[in-house]
Every structure is written in structure tokens, then in C-alpha cells.
Amino acid sequence: MLKSLDIDLPQSEKKTLIGFLSLYSLLCVVILFFISFLYFKLQKELMLKDKRVQLQSYSNDLIYRLKDLHINFDKYKFYPRDERFNSAIYDSDRKLIFSTLKSPKVNLEDVVYTSNKYIHFIEEPDSYYLGAKYVILEVPDNQLWLKSTKEEIFIFIIFGFLALFVVGFFLLKLFLKPMRDAFHLLDRFIKDTTHELNTPISAIVANIELIDIDTIPDEKLKKKIKRIDVGAKTVSNIYQDLTYLTLNNKIISQNELLDLSSLVHQRVDYFKTLANVKRISFKTGIDENIELFCDQKKISKVVDNLLSNAIKYNKVEGSITVTLKEKSLIIEDSGKGIAQDKIDSMFDRYSRFDKSVGGFGIGLNIVSLICKEYHIDIQIKSEVNIGTKVMLSW
């Protein structure tokens, strides 16, 4: 259904919608079964009502014969029987006097009811003929009414559920419209922003790379250029995230056997300028000659976003530890950390847990998308005010 609505919603919104559909479907099923139960009871009562007319006639005949036997007991000397039905009589103490019933249990409180595929009818004669307080008649229940009723209920549930589901579909579209419009507006803004940022960002980054900052003798000028360098790299990283987000479904992976060790070294060196602003130190344990078959730009984007977050949410004079082994990459920081109940939502698009820090809330969503493409498992351990550890394994 979500695909038919032509909408790409974050995971949290999808969970909300799935929850809505599940609850709506459950409510529909409960309503349909309740109506079916009432219909079943009505059909059963109608069947018993029809049978009661017939059994009342049988009962009158049986009571008349009991009366005749009561008067002429010396003549007949046995209780009356009938091929059309089985019968039994009970005295005022509800003790059995005579019975040809097939069903062993009798409910003397009801007038007409079904039991063990038989229909029972209870009649109390005006006089206690031969001590009979209760006369019970029993006829087989062919259950044709039950079969037809079940078929009708089945058809009702199927078509009723489909009708209610169609109604729910249009209700869901109406419910989603404001949300869909908001996300389309945001996506449109992001696309327009990336288009406008392309030329100036490329120009700034290209010119900054041409400047050898270490050869500048003026310390004030050197600091200014370093700030420009930091700002350019920050904006460049955001721009690359936005570009990936807008082109995600159109990017064709250029997979190759990549020297992951060299790439991680390169990305750590790239982010040292940003880390120096908060006096954050890097600790690395990178094994050499680690290779991974993947797209270089995409894996670079994974490492960049994890390093960017480790810097962004770290404390002043904190530390970042980068460990690369044969089948794993671990990036651990000494920053703010995140509450346990929010960890599962960290990869949702546009989710942000610290509004004091800038960003669109798309970095970890991109990390998640790329890791799913390459079957890389992500685990996050975090403690508030202690730090966060992100572990990638493949």
C-alpha cells in the first residue's frame, strides 16, 4: 500500500503507518466477526423457531398418547414411541422415568436447543400423566442451516473486509497527504539547495586545496585560511550528503577491490582539520592491506559521516579512536552519547537528537543505506556523557 501511495517516508513514519493499518485491520476483523456472530445467532434462533412449531405438534401428540396411557394403563402397559422423534419423560424431581434419547445430556431449563447434532424440545404437560413433569423430544439436526450460514458468513467477511480495506486505503491517503506534502517540500528544498551549492562549493574547495597553509608566515592570515578550510570541508561534506540523498536511487555502484586501509588513513587526515577546532585527538589502530570489494565513493561517505558525527558530538579536548581489522571498522568517540531508547531511531532520515548541533539528520540514514547495499552489519553502543562506539562488520 505504501508503494501505491508513491511516497518515500522515513522508517519511523512507516512504522506509524504500519501500526495504523494493523490497528485498523484488527478493528475491521473484530467488527466483522461480531456482526457474523450476531447473524449466526439470529439464523440459529430462526431455525429453532421453525423447528419449535414442528416439535410442538409432535409434543401435543405425545402428551395426548401419555394421557391415553394414563387412563388405559392396563390396556397398553408401555410408554408411547414414535419413529419421527426420540423422547423422554422426567418426574417433578427431575428423575428419568423413560428415555429413547440419543443425546445423554438434557437441559430442562431451556425450551428448545441444540446438543450433539440433535434438537431438543422441552414441554411441561398440564397434568402429571404417569408422573411426567417434563416431556423431552429429540430430532436430528441435519445442520443444513449451519453449512449455508457459514458460507454466507465467509462471503460476508471477505467482501466486508475488502470494502472496509478500500475505505481504509482512502482514509490513509487522506491521513498521509499533509505528511507527504511536507516531505516532498523538504526533498524539493534539498534538491534545489544542492543544485545551487554545486558551483560555489567546488570553487571554494578547489582553491583551498591550492593553498599551502604551512608556508604562510602571517599567523593571523593562517588562522583565517584554516577557518575557511574547516568551513569549506564542513559544507562540502553536507553537500555530498545532500547529493547522495537526492540521487540515491540513480547511483550505479562502481565496485572494485578497494584498499580500505589507505582510504581510512586518508579520511582521518582529511578530518583532522575539523577535529583541531575542538582540540580533538585521533587514536588509530589501522591494520594494513585490508581490502573490501565496494564503491570507493560510497564507502568514503560511510567513513566520512561516522567521523563527522564523532567530531560534531564530541566534547572539547575529546578523543576519537579508529580501529580497522580484517572484518571490522570501529569508530569510538568520547562525546555526549545518546540515550538507549533513541539508538534504534538513529538511522531514520531527518532524525536529530541534539538540536544544538547543526545538520539535516541525514548522515546516518545514508550510512544505513550504503551498509545495507553491501551487507555490512552496524552496531551502536552508547552511554550518555561517556561516548559512542559504532561497529561495522562484514
Image: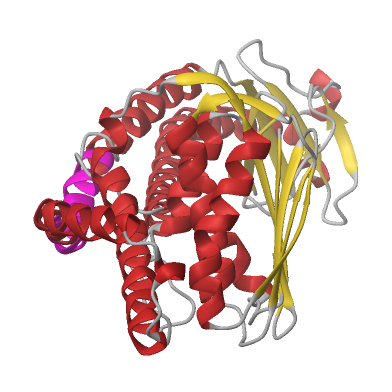
Q: Residue at x 64, y 43 (%)?
A: 122
Estimate the x, y position of residue 161 in percent, counting from the top left.
32, 37
Q: Nearer the viewer, residue 249 or 164?
A: 249
Estimate the x, y position of residue 114 in percent, counting from the top left.
63, 34
Q: Was residue 170 drawn as part of the magenta stretch in this picture? A: yes
- Residue 15 seen: no
* Looking at the image, residue 114 lies above or below residue 233: above
Q: Which residue occupies the extreme top position in the image? A: 83
Q: Was residue 58 drawn as part of the magenta stretch in this picture? A: no
* Looking at the image, residue 64 lies above or below residue 318: above
Q: Residue at x 37, y 54 (%)?
A: 10
* Looking at the image, residue 387 lies above or below residue 283: below
Q: Nearer the viewer, residue 111 or 228?
A: 228
| Number of marks in the rendered image | 0
* Looking at the image, residue 304 lies above or below residue 288: below
Q: Residue at x 40, y 83 (%)?
A: 223
Q: Quadrant of the N terminus?
A: top left
Horizontally, residue 320 falls left or right of residue 298, namely right
Q: Quadrant of the C terminus?
A: top right
Specify the segment rendered in magenta.
165-185
Estimate the x, y position of residue 156 in percent, counting from the top left.
32, 31
- Give the dominant element type of the magenta stretch: helix, strand or loop: helix
Horizontally, residue 20 falls left or right of residue 245, namely right
Q: Nearer the viewer, residue 299 or 229?
A: 229
- Residue 228 seen: yes
Colouring mode (rainbow / by chain / secondary structure / one colour): secondary structure
Estimate the x, y position of residue 335 in percent, counting from the top left.
65, 79
Q: Residue at x 25, y 38 (%)?
A: 247
